[in-house]
Image: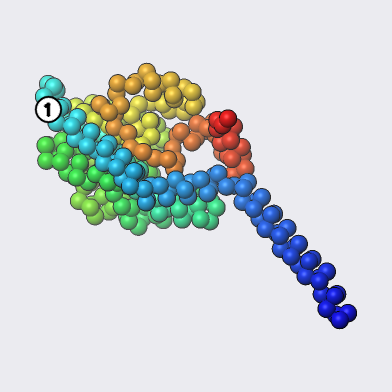
Amino acid sequence: MKLKYSFFPLLILIISCSESKKISSTAQGEQTGIGTQGKLFASLFQQRAAEYHALCLQAYNIARLRLDESFQHSSSAKPKAIITDLDETVLNNSPAEIHQDLQEKGFDNTEWNKWTAKGEADTLPGSFSFFKYAASKNVEIFYISNRDENDRAGTLQNLQRFGFPNADNAHLLLRQNTSGKEVRRQQVIATHDVILLLGDNLSDFTDLFDKKTVNQRLTTVQQLSTEFGNRYIVLPNPVYGDWENAIYQYKALTMAQKDSAIKSQLKSY
């Protein structure tokens, strides 16, 4: 009987320690919850939401309409071209994002190079059929991406695997000295009549969005409102991009600092 009663304090102590550990673990998880768990939720939307699928199809359907219209209005002697981004515009990299987030890690260039070398990214809904259609109209496709030269072989392999048009070195313009794309865009514009630009990040269209604050980006969108759905075709990306970098003021932050910056931008009631 004495042994029986002496067991209860020990049991209570074990339960208390277990609950304390749970609380501590939860608190620690909450510190990085927005940065990693939030991205997992967004990647789930990208992979499993029919709405995401529909948004991509909507963007590419509009792009096809604008492409057809361009033949009625353009009088340029230059060959026609389309400039497109790659990641989250043509290729879906959500498996790479999820791989990092499940480990509570942010973007890592070494891990990214491993992913691109596989050449296994799937296509966004509607992307392949649109670019094949454009090529059938003798429109060249230029892929301007901020992947770097280490990613070139895997990127071409990825595009060629699906049979994308112009999947060659001459049409794949990767990042060299800067992430800004304006120099590369102007390189194409100098020799071609660029009728459409496609991207998931506003800097895929013009340098007016490069390294701008949240409010500056919003203001510039309003100023260029007639371009969207006409010359600029935007693909949805809730996972990452300059919209997120602008919240961090383009600074390298810890997970806790990122969570704090995100919370400071949220509106509630």
Q: Is residue 149 visible?
A: no
**Residue at figure coordinates x 27%, y 46% from the top left:** 125
Judging from the image, the colouring scheme is rainbow
* Residue 13 x %, y %: 79, 66
Q: Is residue 77 left or right of residue 103?
A: left
Q: Residue 234: horizontal and vertical position, in percent?
A: 32, 33
Q: Quadrant of the N terminus?
A: bottom right
Residue depicted at x 55% and y 30%: 267
Q: In the picture provided, is 178 more to the left or to the right than 126?
A: right
Q: Amino acid at mark 1?
A: Phe
SS at circle 1: helix
Residue annotated with mark 1: 71
* Left or right relative to 150: residue 72: left
Q: Quadrant of residue 174?
A: top left
Does 175 appear above or below 13? above
Residue 163 against residue 197 in the figure, above or below: below
Crowd class of label 1 (few under 14; some 14 to 19; many from 20; radius 10 Å): few
Pick the front one: 27 or 209: 27
The residue located at (42%, 40%) in the rendering is: 238
Which quarter of the rendered picture does the C terminus lie within? Answer: top right
Q: Residue at x 45, y 53 (%)?
A: 98
| Residue furthest to the right | 2
Q: In the rendered image, which quarter is residue 15 located in?
A: bottom right
In this rendered view, identify the residue nearer to me: 148 or 31: 31
